[in-house]
């Protein structure tokens, strides 16, 4: 059988040429069959010079249902849709897909779509919209970048989007109001970011609407959660503000460069927050655990060990570990008590729900001890009745005292130790005057 030059030059000429791969088990195939394992974007007229719009050509290539390979070059397009399960887009060399109109640059709509080695450029100073939308499940990006997005560099609404590496960037002009990544939707679970970087500390990651996310070994801007779907954040450098307004969030081994960390919005109840012992925060950090945060654990030794850090704990039903910190104990009684020119000094620490308190109240010029039962304010309410010890110096006479905390109380009654003082009464002795003081210690379990 002879094959003519004209036959080989025809559109089906490659079917007349054989191909045999090396190695054990290889089978004979035609060159035509071999080349159709994947299609090149340029096979359908896509322009790698970036001089012409390639939208129709790329959509035609994707309509084959085969994996589409992009030779080195720049491809201008808009509104590309990947509409076949497990279809892949593969870049060879330096490949950029560049937006040339408003709207979404590319949407991955089916299960298992994958992009490898491609840079998506949103031309954000010129065109609006997201760079990438993942509405299908199990989308993957390996070694890809998404740059200069006007809105989101990647927006995920399908389940189990996974991003491995790459630079993801919101346009500088729009970064302060945006995020590079957004995961949204009640069914949007099991999303993963590993080894990603963002160039804008005012950009970052937004998780909302019941979505969940695990992010690790990455560097990004701000982090905001508005979801009870859950987030796990491990081994990252976080350059922007952190606001956690949803339940089930875990943090371990992260470095926080911004000075604002807020857990809870103070209005909606959240729980299941774990702040591990290996996180590192910046100097002058404002760390706030808002009201209605419950059933959570916070290891805050590294926060209190940071120069200038301010910690505000407005909720009680949490296990909190931190070293000794100062507080100002209130002295309470009837008749408008006052220490005058004296001082009120206190310290407390926590280990889980266990609270350890030391205080000293000194009375100075202009003091008024008040009347009735004297009490000292504690930093947290007690879960049950507890007795502590105190010592008083009243006009040079020393007294041993009891500190009596009732269940659910956040103050301790100051009482005479009836075993050592006669007569046995419940009132603290007097007369109190400038130079008198009370100091005491008590350990108790904080109430939920």
Image (tube, rainbow, N blue to C red):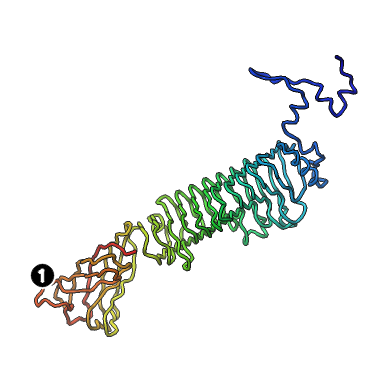
Which of these two is toward me, 111 or 114?
111
Q: Residue 1 lies in what quarter of the image?
A: top right
Which of these two is toward me, 391 or 406?
406
From where the camera sits, is residue 206 visible? yes
Residue placed furthest toward the bottom: 335
Residues packed near mark 1 inside 10 Å, few (<14), some (14 to 19) or many (20 plus): few
Question: Who's the residue at 29% across and 59% down the image?
Answer: 354
Q: Residue 85 lies in what quarter of the image?
A: top right
- Relative to 224, residue 373 above or below: below
Report helix, strand or loop for mark 1.
loop
Q: Is residue 199 left or right of residue 35?
A: left
Q: Is residue 416 left or right of residue 383?
A: left
Please state the horizontal and vertical placement of residue 158, each as a whole percent of the image. Answer: 61, 50
Residue placed furthest toward the left: 422
Count of numbered labels shown in the rendering:
1
Please state the horizontal and vertical placement of residue 384, each as a whole percent of the image. Answer: 26, 65
Location of mark 1 (residue): 419
Which of these two is toward me, 270 or 412?
270
Residue placed furthest toward the top: 1
Which of these two is toward me, 347 or 158?
158
Q: Residue 443 lies in what quarter of the image?
A: bottom left
Question: Who's the residue at 25% across and 83% down the image?
Answer: 370
Q: Is residue 238 left or right of residue 367?
A: right
Please state the horizontal and vertical placement of residue 214, each as a whole percent of the image. Answer: 52, 48
Please state the horizontal and vertical placement of residue 74, each as a whole percent of the image. Answer: 76, 43
Question: Who's the residue at 15% across and 76% down the image?
Answer: 396
Which quadrant of the rendered structure holds the C terminus?
A: bottom left
């Amino acid at each position: 059988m002879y094959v003519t030059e004209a036959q080989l030059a025809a559109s089906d000429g490659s079917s007349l040429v054989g191909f045999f791969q090396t190695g054990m088990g290889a089978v004979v195939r035609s060159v035509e069959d071999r080349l159709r394992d994947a299609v090149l974007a340029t096979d359908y007229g896509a322009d790698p010079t970036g001089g012409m719009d390639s939208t129709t050509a790329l959509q035609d290539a994707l309509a084959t249902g085969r994996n589409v390979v992009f030779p080195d070059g720049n491809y201008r397009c808009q509104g590309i849709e990947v509409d076949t399960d497990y279809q892949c887009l593969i870049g060879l060399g330096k490949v950029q897909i560049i937006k040339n109109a408003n709207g979404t640059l590319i949407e991955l709509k089916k299960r298992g779509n994958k992009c490898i080695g491609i840079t998506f450029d949103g031309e954000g100073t010129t065109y609006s919209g997201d760079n990438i939308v993942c509405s299908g499940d199990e989308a993957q990006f390996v070694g890809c970048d998404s740059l200069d997005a006007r809105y989101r560099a990647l927006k995920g609404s399908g389940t189990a989007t996974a991003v491995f590496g790459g630079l993801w960037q919101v346009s500088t002009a729009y970064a302060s109001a945006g995020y590079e990544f957004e995961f949204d939707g009640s069914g949007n679970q099991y999303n993963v970011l590993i080894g990603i970087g963002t160039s804008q500390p005012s950009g970052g990651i937004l998780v909302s609407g019941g979505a969940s996310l695990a992010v690790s070994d990455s560097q990004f801007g701000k982090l905001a959660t508005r979801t009870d779907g859950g987030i796990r954040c491990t081994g990252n450098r976080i350059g922007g503000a952190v606001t956690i307004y949803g339940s089930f969030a875990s943090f371990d081994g992260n470095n926080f460069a911004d000075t604002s960390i807020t857990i809870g919005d103070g209005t909606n109840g959240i729980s299941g927050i774990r702040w591990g012992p290996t996180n590192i925060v910046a100097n002058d950090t404002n760390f706030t655990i808002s009201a209605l945060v419950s059933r959570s654990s916070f290891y805050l030794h590294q926060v209190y060990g940071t120069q200038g850090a301010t910690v505000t704990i407005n909720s009680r039903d949490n296990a909190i570990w931190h070293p000794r910190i100062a507080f100002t104990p209130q002295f309470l009684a009837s008749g408008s008590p006052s220490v005058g020119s004296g001082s009120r000094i206190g310290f407390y620490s926590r280990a889980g729900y266990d609270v350890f308190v030391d205080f000293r109240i000194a009375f100075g010029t202009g003091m008024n001890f008040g009347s009735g039962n004297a009490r000292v304010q504690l930093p947290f309410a007690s879960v049950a009745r507890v007795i502590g010890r105190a010592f008083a110096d009243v006009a040079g006479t020393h007294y041993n005292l009891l500190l009596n905390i009732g269940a659910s109380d956040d103050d301790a009654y100051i009482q005479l130790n009836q075993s050592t003082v006669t007569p046995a009464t419940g009132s603290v002795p007097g007369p109190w005057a400038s130079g008198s003081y009370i100091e005491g210690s008590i350990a108790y379990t904080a109430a939920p």
